[in-house]
Image (spheres, grey):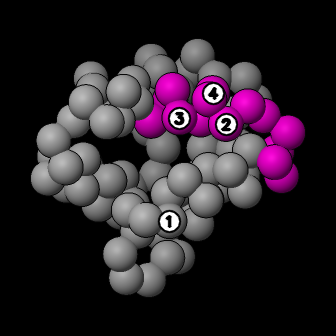
Amino acid sequence: MLNQLSFQKFKKTLTELKEDSPKETAEYKKLSPAEKQAVKDVFTLLGNTKGEIISKVDGIIKQVAKKRNVKVSAIEDYFDNEILN
């Protein structure tokens, strides 16, 4: 779904997400405890990333998914739903 967004909107949203942490949104509450921790880890890594983060998002998500033993698609779906809503 991320590919359906305009690049500028995606970049703006991603930058905003980088500066935030996960909120107690309806989408966030749907996640399992492991998925919630994975999302928190993604936010932490994005917050610590210097420079252009867009090219690094996929790698960060894959790294966190492997570490937390969750599906990459679960993390991607969470961010898709948060960005589109």
Query: Which residue sits at x=54%, y=53%?
Result: 58
Image location (x, y in percent) of residue 61 = 61, 50
Q: Amino acid at mark 2?
A: Val
66 relative to 84 in the view: left or right: right
The answer to whether residue 11 of the structure is visible from this angle is: yes
The image quarter containing residue 59 is bottom right
Nearer to us in this view, 37 or 69: 69
Disc 4 + disc 2, Cβ < 8 Å: yes
| Residue 16 vs residue 54, the one in the foreground | 54
Q: Residue at x 49, y 76 (%)?
A: 49
Is 7 placed left or right of 55 in the picture? left
Mark 2 vs mark 3, CA separation in Å? 6 Å
* Outermost bottom residue: 50
The residue that disc 4 covers is: 74
Residue occupied by mark 1? 56
The stretch of residues the image draws in magenta is 66-79
